[in-house]
């Protein structure tokens, strides 16, 4: 279970998260919606451990383990995975080398054996086929020259390979075409099960028809202001977020 | 007994006076005259100081304040050699051939052929090359006949351990005739505890349609000075491919002069400088486009840790005759420490009007977003950093097609990285 209590955080001295309370029980998928600039990505970065995002109060634990004091790679080893809203390009780092290094790091953390190049290729090819990704993407630099949609698919591929326990998807649907949206959603749904939880950040109700959430939360100005069932997404789609509430 | 200590240029001139009757080819009038002329040139110029424009960023006082002795190794001395990268290797110890340690079927050296190379030993104007001409004892002599593929040869220069600083000046002379091919892996090493000066000069002549691939691993000992120069000419449709890895030494200068003399000649000068605390490395290139339709590519990458200093100076001269020149020069530095410093000075001098020439220089640090992306995928910080450093070097390295060279280079980069604190 992901448990966030009273979480406040600043970026460059500016308070962005103003007391977040949120619980995602193991096995559930929760959606977060909210206006631009409300702090959704900030929350995801704070959970993943990005430098420059200073936690000023509150706690965040995953299965009882404090996340906030840990290095990003330690969080990944615990099973936390962030699909970036803006995936980073790594010129000169081959995608295959990157994916294998990441997979083996996570496997080591789980006490599993490392995969050699051949074993890795077999696994990677199978996952790429499921995601309708051309194989030559393995040979290219990580995200270098990828289209917006291809970058998002590469995030989903990483998620599929690393098989996290908690996936935070930050607008993974933005930029995906209709078919890709369906394929990416299948990728998330394939991981669903009693040991998997997800936090799905999105602006669009449509994603949530593919990845049906157990709960929907609305984040505004650094706070969760509303929570409800999946029908809340439909309601928001129809009526919008309304005027921002006074902080 | 009183001993006069000679330092700087005076020390080397003094040594020349004492040695000149015993140097290889001392009895050949043409060579004795050439050495005397070199001595005159070196006496007039001395070691370059920072007042000389080409040496503005590199201060040689560490070298000029030291006294250097003759290396005293004997032919029968045992010396531990690094593992060979190729089947054919020629070994020079302290600037002298060790045929007993070498394996190369058609081995000819400058000293062994000294009676037959009249007119082929250059005396360049630069003081370090003059010093080399004055005192060289040996070097590789490679004469590749037209249409021959001579394969891959490793040339190892190694310094022996010595309680007193030593100096040696290898002179390598390479000539590829029409359509010939040769790959040289040049490895320069020495013990970490010995102060020595290695001042090699390469003369390279690439004939029409010939290809010379020249990869260099500069891994001199930690206290060593290496001040090396290459003088290359490339005839029509010929290719000179140079890659230099500067990873060792305390004070290092890699100076390359290449002249493209025939239509359609190509030159690649790439390199990486991997610098740790206390090191100074300077790459200075002069690219002379003297004929039409030639292409030159230069990509140099410097990674600096600790208190180290890197220099890149690159001048491209496009003469009036050199229409349709395609020139590219990129020089990038990655500072991994706040105490490191990089100076770079690109220079274009263009007299032709139909020319495509570009250059660029960047200095930066590791990208925090990239680092976080890798770490968020479970990759530990040290591994993530090393992946990004390698990625930074990738562009300079990727032109190396030969597997042997690539592996040698990869393990040199890996070795450097593992030595970092
Ligand atoms: N380095 C920074 N300095 C100052 N403000 C910042 C910095 N980084 C983010 N912010 C601000 O923090 C706020 C929250 O940004 P965040 O990216 O979390 O929003 P979001 O909810 O993900 O928006 P979107 O829906 O557009 O992706 C924004 O107002 C943004 O401008
Ligand atoms: Mg966002």
Image: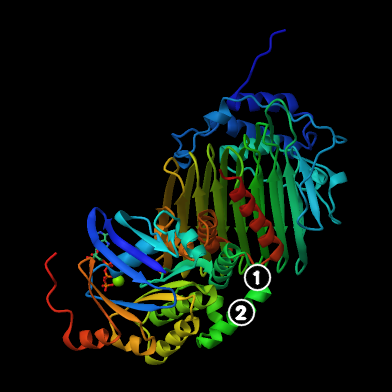
Q: Residue at x 54, y 68 (%)?
A: A98
Q: Position of residue B222 (x, y in %)?
A: 62, 37
At x 84% / y 55%, what residue is drawn? B104
Chain ID, mark 2: A
Question: Could you give the CA–CA distance between mark 1 and mark 2, rounded to whole angstroms?
Answer: 9 Å
Q: Position of residue B141 (x, y in %)?
A: 76, 51
In the image, B72 versus B86, the foreground residue is: B86
Q: Quadrant of residue B178?
A: bottom right
Q: Quadrant of ligand 1?
A: bottom left
When the figure is inspected, residue B91 is found, relative to residue A117, above or below; the finding is above
Residue at the extreme top: B1
Q: Callout 1: helix, strand or loop? A: loop
* The CB of the residue at mark 2 lies under 8 Å from ligand 2: no
Q: Could you tell me which quadrant the C terminus of chain A lies in?
A: bottom left
Q: Callout 1: few (<14), some (14-19), or many (20+) C-alpha neighbours within 10 Å?
A: some
Q: Which mark is residue A123?
A: 2
Single out the residue that lies furthest toward the bottom: A179
Question: In this picture, is B419 found above or below A32?
Answer: above
Is residue B291 among the parts visible in the rendering? no
- The residue carrying mark 1 is A115
Location of residue A174 in the rendering, given as x and y in whole percent from the top left corner: 33, 81
């Amino acid at each position: 279970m992901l448990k966030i209590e009273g979480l406040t955080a600043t970026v460059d001295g500016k308070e962005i998260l103003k007391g977040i309370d949120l619980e995602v029980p193991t096995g559930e998928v929760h959606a977060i919606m909210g206006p631009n600039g409300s702090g959704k990505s900030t929350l995801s970065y704070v959970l993943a451990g990005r430098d420059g995002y200073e936690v000023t109060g509150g706690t965040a634990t995953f299965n009882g383990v404090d996340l906030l004091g840990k290095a990003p790679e330690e969080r990944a080893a615990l099973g936390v995975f962030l699909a970036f809203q803006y995936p980073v390009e790594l010129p000169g780092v081959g995608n295959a080398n990157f994916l294998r290094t990441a997979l083996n790091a996570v496997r080591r953390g789980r006490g599993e054996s490392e995969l050699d190049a051949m074993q890795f290729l077999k696994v990677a090819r199978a996952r790429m086929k499921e995601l309708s990704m051309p194989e030559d993407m393995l040979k290219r630099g990580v995200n270098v020259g990828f289209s917006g949609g291809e970058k998002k698919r590469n995030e989903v591929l990483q998620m599929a390979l690393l098989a996290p326990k908690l996936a935070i998807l930050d607008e993974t649907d933005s930029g995906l075409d209709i078919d890709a949206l369906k394929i990416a959603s299948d990728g998330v749904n394939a991981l669903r099960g009693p040991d998997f939880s997800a936090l799905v950040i999105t602006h669009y109700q449509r994603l949530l028809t593919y990845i049906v959430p157990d709960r929907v939360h609305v984040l505004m100005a650094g706070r969760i202001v509303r929570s409800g069932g999946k029908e809340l997404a439909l309601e928001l789609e129809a009526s919008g977020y309304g005027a921002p509430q006074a902080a | 007994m009183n001993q006069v200590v000679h330092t700087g240029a005076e020390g080397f001139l003094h040594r020349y006076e004492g040695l000149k009757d015993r140097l290889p080819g001392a009895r050949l009038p043409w060579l004795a005259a050439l050495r005397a002329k070199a001595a005159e040139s070196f006496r007039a110029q001395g070691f370059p100081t920072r007042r000389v424009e080409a040496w503005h960023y590199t201060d040689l006082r560490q070298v000029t304040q030291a006294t250097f002795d003759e290396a005293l190794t004997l032919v029968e001395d045992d010396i531990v050699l690094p593992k060979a990268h190729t089947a054919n290797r020629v070994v020079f110890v302290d600037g002298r051939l060790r045929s007993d340690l070498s394996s190369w079927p058609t081995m000819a050296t400058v000293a062994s052929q000294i009676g037959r190379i009249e007119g082929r030993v250059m005396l360049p104007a630069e003081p370090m090359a003059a010093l080399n001409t004055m005192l060289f004892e040996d070097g590789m002599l490679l004469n590749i006949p037209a249409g021959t593929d001579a394969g891959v040869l490793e040339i190892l220069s190694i310094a022996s351990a010595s309680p007193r600083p030593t100096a040696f000046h290898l002179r390598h002379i390479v000539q590829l005739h029409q359509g010939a091919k040769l790959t040289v892996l040049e490895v320069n090493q020495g013990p970490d505890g010995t102060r020595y000066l290695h001042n090699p000069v390469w003369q390279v002549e690439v004939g029409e349609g010939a290809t010379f691939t020249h990869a260099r691993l500069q891994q001199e000992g930690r206290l060593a000075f290496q001040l090396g120069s290459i003088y290359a000419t490339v005839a029509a449709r010929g290719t000179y491919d140079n890659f230099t890895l500067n990873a060792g030494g305390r004070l290092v200068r890699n100076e390359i002069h290449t002249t493209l003399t025939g239509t359609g000649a190509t030159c690649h000068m790439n390199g990486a400088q991997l610098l740790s605390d206390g090191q100074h490395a300077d790459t200075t290139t002069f690219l002379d486009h003297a004929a039409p339709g030639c292409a030159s590519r230069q990509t140099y990458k410097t990674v600096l840790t600790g208190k180290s200093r890197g220099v890149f100076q690159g001048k491209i001269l496009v003469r009036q005759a050199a229409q349709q020149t395609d020139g590219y020069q990129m020089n990038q530095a990655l500072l991994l420490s706040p105490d490191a410093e990089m100076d770079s000075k690109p220079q274009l001098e263009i007299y032709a009007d139909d020319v495509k020439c570009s250059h660029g220089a960047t200095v930066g640090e590791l990208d925090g977003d990239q680092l976080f992306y890798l770490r968020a995928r479970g990759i530990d910080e040290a591994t993530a950093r090393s992946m990004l450093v390698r990625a930074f070097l990738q562009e300079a390295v990727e032109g190396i097609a030969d597997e042997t060279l690539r592996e040698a280079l990869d393990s040199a980069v890996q070795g450097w990285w593992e030595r970092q604190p």
